[in-house]
Amino acid sequence: MSVVEMVSNDIPALMLDIGRKARAAASKLATASAERKHAALVGAAQAVSDHQAEILAANALDMENARQKGMTHAFQDRLFLTEARLNGIVDALRTIAELPDPVGAVISEWDRPNGLHIERVRTPLGVIGVIYESRPNVTADAGALCLKSGNAVILRGGSDSAHSSRALVDCLRLGLKQAGLPEDGVQLVPTTDRAAVGEMLKGLSGNIDVIVPRGGKSLVARVQSEARVPVFAHLEGLVHVYIDRSADLEKAVAITLNSKMRRTGICGAAETLLVHKEVVSTHLKPIIDALVAKGCEIRGDATVQSLIAQAKPATEEDWKTEYEDAIISVKIVDSLEAAIAHVEHYSSHHTEAIIAEDPAAVEKFFSEIDSAILVHNASTQFADGGEFGFGGEIGIATGKMHARGPVGVEQLTSFKYRVRGSGQLRP
């Protein structure tokens, strides 16, 4: 379970070799039986369970490095593995194993007047490159979801999680080996050199079919700027919670608190709170008091500052910021329309929530806001593939092509058409 160090200084050659191995593995995974893929995932889950001590020791090395670098508490929380979190990874692997196999599933079928029977059928994408930052669970989720959907995956995690990711990838590869499937179906780039990312973005001489970036704005911007292969965009989670004038106070307090403070470093955490002016006198202080009691810093507009002693001034930059920390920006809006306008102007199109009892307000919010996930009277932290029943996710896609929202096994497939005839000729 040791970290593999790169011995070659020739990054292009190293990455091309990884790409070729992935392509060879992908051709076998694409036709692997559902039973073998299931066995590989169950085996990987068991390996994670059996090697908990080694994985936690590897994570301890990453954590020590993070502390020495002065990483923020929120960053360290994303990186940190505990026995409970490892059990969560084991459960996720087993859940993904039990999902229906998407490969070969008939999406739709129909008959033509000439007697042709046409089927649209799910197929793997091929080789998927996943570029991500510090969260070790992404290693397990991405590897498992790609395997389940018949794809090979090349994982390039951040240097901060190198030891943890290697330990988890070793478990995934062990599961593949035990199931008689190619271990190179899951590969971790064994160098933290940024040049490796550049090689992936070039496509590894046609050996990568799709790139999935998962991380901060600078990472995603680089991927979108340099990629020569299709990209599933996963922008930052600049998430909004809007408290409508019809909002139930108890729900507003509980949902806002959970949306912001359950885990502040995940992409589904709320970053901006919008409150309708008609409920400022009843709702604002209880919500803010609950947040402050949990250690949240408040940055507010002029009205919020006048009413909340702890509030610091919110600048224009605050409305654009994904804090990934115990900080929230708060603004009073004159109307639902004003809230929608604010969200549409500043949102990263990830997740937005409305707390309201008025069905008309909810429908307007849902129909006029163009984000991947819209939530009514529930925490934004449900913006997660596992919570959607997908078993896990590679990330939340915020683009509009192919996949949007949680990217699970079905989103990691394309399709082909099967046309069955009985001798038909085109006149």
Image: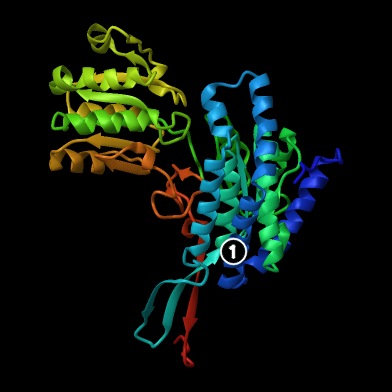
Relative to 225, 236 lies left or right: left
State the residue in front, 80 or 325.
Answer: 80
Q: Quadrant of residue 172?
A: bottom right
Is residue 253 visible from the viewing direction of this image?
yes
Q: Residue at x 48, y 54 (%)?
A: 408
Secondary structure state at the residue bearing disc 1: loop
Image spot of residue 124 (x, y percent): 56, 63
Q: Position of residue 311 (x, y in %)?
A: 32, 10
Residue projecting furthest to the bottom: 423
User: Quick one: quadrant of the C terminus?
Assistant: bottom left
Q: Nearer the viewer, residue 181 or 420?
A: 181
Seen at 66% across and 40% down, the residue is 164
- Residue type highlighted by circle 1: Gly
Q: Nearer the viewer, residue 366 or 134?
A: 134
How is the protein colored in the picture? rainbow
177 or 46: nearer the eye? 46
Looking at the image, residue 374 lies above or below residue 186: above
Q: Residue at x 73, y 52 (%)?
A: 205
Image coordinates for residue 234, horizontal then vertical, percent: 49, 40
* Above or below, comparing residue 245 to residue 10 in the picture: above
Q: Residues within 10 Å of mark 1 (few under 14, many from 20)?
A: many
Residue 349, quarter of the rendered image: top left
Q: Which residue is mark 1?
A: 150
* Left or right, residue 44 beside residue 292: right
